[in-house]
Amino acid sequence: MVPGASRTGHRRRRPRVHPVRTHHRIRTQPQAGGDPLSLLDIRNLEVTYASGAAAVRGVDLSLEAGQKLGIAGESGCGKSTLALALLRLLPAGTRITGEVLLDGEDVLTMKWGRLRAVRWAGASIVFQGAMHSLNAVHRIGDQIAEPMLIHRTATPTAAKKRVGELLEQVGLPAARAQAYPHELSGGQRQRVMIAMALACDPSLIVADEPTTALDVMIQAQILRLIEQLVSDKGLGLVMISHDLAVLADTCDRLAVMYAGRVVEEGPASQVYEDAEHPYGKALSGAFPRIGDPASRRAPRGLAGDPPDPSALPGGCTFHPRCPVALDICATEDQELRSASPGRRAACVHVGASAAVVEQTR
Ligand SMILES: Nc1ncnc2c1ncn2[C@@H]1O[C@H](COP(=O)(O)OP(=O)(O)OP(=O)(O)O)[C@@H](O)[C@H]1O
Ligand code: SF4
Ligand SMILES: [Mg+2]
C-alpha cells in the first residue's frame, strides 16, 4: 500500500556503512559534448536478483555536487537495491547492467582493488536500519576511526583527533568517543552513523531511510544535520525514503520509483505538490499537508499492492492500480519522457503522446 550477479560477489546484504574513495578526481574532464561530468550519473541501470526479481529496471538519474536527490516509492519498489547497486554491494548471483559513473568512473566495471579504494572516500552509504548495526562490543570512537585506519587515510593519532571533530560536527561531544553503542539513544547512534559516513571525506552520501526508526523531533534534527553537512561541504546527497513529504522538505529533486522504474522525476516541491504521474499523485496524496485540514482528515490512499518483481504485468506496470488507465496501458509500456521543463514522467497522459491519445479516444 502507499503509506546481476554482483560483479563483486560481496556477501553482506546490509553493511553498516561503506564510505567510498575516489583517489583520482576526474570531474574536471568535460564530456564529448563539452558539459562537465556529473558527480553521479546512473545510466540504464538494471538489477535482477538470482530469484528472477527484476528489482531495478532501466534507471537513468544524475546528481551534481551540492545537489540533493530524493528517491521515493512504496516498499519493494527497488530503492535499497538501487542504493546497493551504486557501490556493487549486491549479493552474488545478482545480474547488474548499465553504468554507474561516479566522478566519471564506472563503478560497475572497476577492478576489485580500485573499487575497494573507491569505497572509502568518494561516496559513503548509510544503510537502512544502520543504527542497529554498530558493533555492540566496540567503543564508537574506534568504530568511526576504523575506516581511516584500514585505508590509511590517517595515522592513529590523527584518526583519534578526527573522530572528536566528526562527533562534534554531528552534534555530539568528542568525549562520547569512549561510549559503547548501548549507552547512546537511537538519535545519537544515527548521528554516529553519519559521522562514520563522513570519516573519509566523501563527495557523495547515499542515505537509505536514515530517519525512519526515529521519532519526529529527532527525525527533524537528523534531517537538518544532513542538510547542513551537505551544504557546508558541497557534497551530493541521494536520500531514499518512502516518505515523500520528508524528501520534498529536504531535497532539490525528487525521483518516484514504481516496480523498479523511475516513473517521475523533477524539482522536489513540484513533484510533491503537483505530480504528473498518476502514481506520483497517489503517493503524494497519501501524505497529509501541513495547513490543509481536508488532507489531514482524509489522506488519499491507493488500493492494491505493487506487483511482484518476478512476475511484472505487461504494458505499464502501474495499470492494474491506475485510476486513469486506458486500454492501451495494458499492452504498451511508457518510457520516461519530458513532461514540462525540468520534469519527466512515464505515462501515456504526459508529453507529446498525450495529445495523440486524446485524439484517438
Ligand atoms: N537479496 C534479494 N534477493 C532476491 N530479491 C530481493 C533481494 N533483496 C530485495 N529483493 C526484492 O527486490 C525488490 C526490491 O527490494 P528493495 O529492498 O530494493 O525495495 P525497497 O524499495 O528498498 O523497499 P523498502 O521500502 O521496504 O525498503 C523486492 O521485491 C524485494 O523482495
Ligand atoms: S501509462 Fe496508463 S496505467 Fe500507466 S500511469 Fe499512465 S495512465 Fe496509468
Ligand atoms: Mg529499502
Image (cartoon, helix red, strand yellow):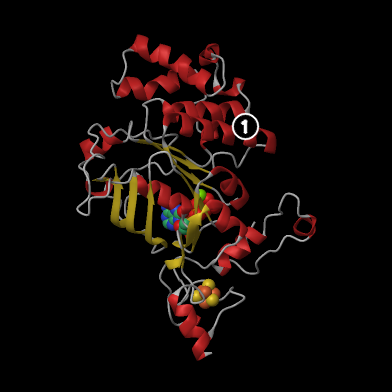
- Left/right placement of residue 78 relative to residue 25 reads right
Quarter of the image for residue 21 reads top left
Residue 126 image position (x, y, % from top left): 47, 37
Give the answer, above or below, for where 66 lies relative to 290: above
Quarter of the image for residue 187 reads top right
Residue 136 image position (x, y, % from top left): 52, 24
- Left/right placement of residue 21 relative to residue 109 reads right
Name the residue nearer the viewer: 184 or 343.
343
Q: Residue furthest bottom?
A: 360
Residue 197 image position (x, y, % from top left): 43, 30
From this viewpoint, is residue 309 visible? yes
| Figure quadrant of the N terminus | bottom right
Name the residue nearer the viewer: 124 or 232.
232
Quarter of the image for residue 23 reads top left
Q: Residue at x 47, y 34 (%)?
A: 230
Residue 72 image position (x, y, % from top left): 53, 54
Q: Which residue is mark 1?
A: 221
Q: Determine if the C-beta at disc 1 is less than 8 A from ligand 3.
A: no
| Figure quadrant of the C terminus | bottom right
Name the residue nearer the viewer: 215 or 31.
31
Q: Residue furthest top?
A: 157
- Left/right placement of residue 98 relative to residue 222 reads left
Give the answer, above or below, for where 299 lies relative to 189: below
Give the structural element (helix, strand or loop) at label 1: helix
Name the residue nearer the viewer: 83 or 355.
355
Circle 1 Cα neighbour tier, 10 Å, few/some/many (<14 / 14–19 / ≥20): some
Q: Residue at x 52, y 76 (%)?
A: 349
> The disc labelled 1 sits on which kind of residue?
Gln
From this viewpoint, is residue 319 visible? no
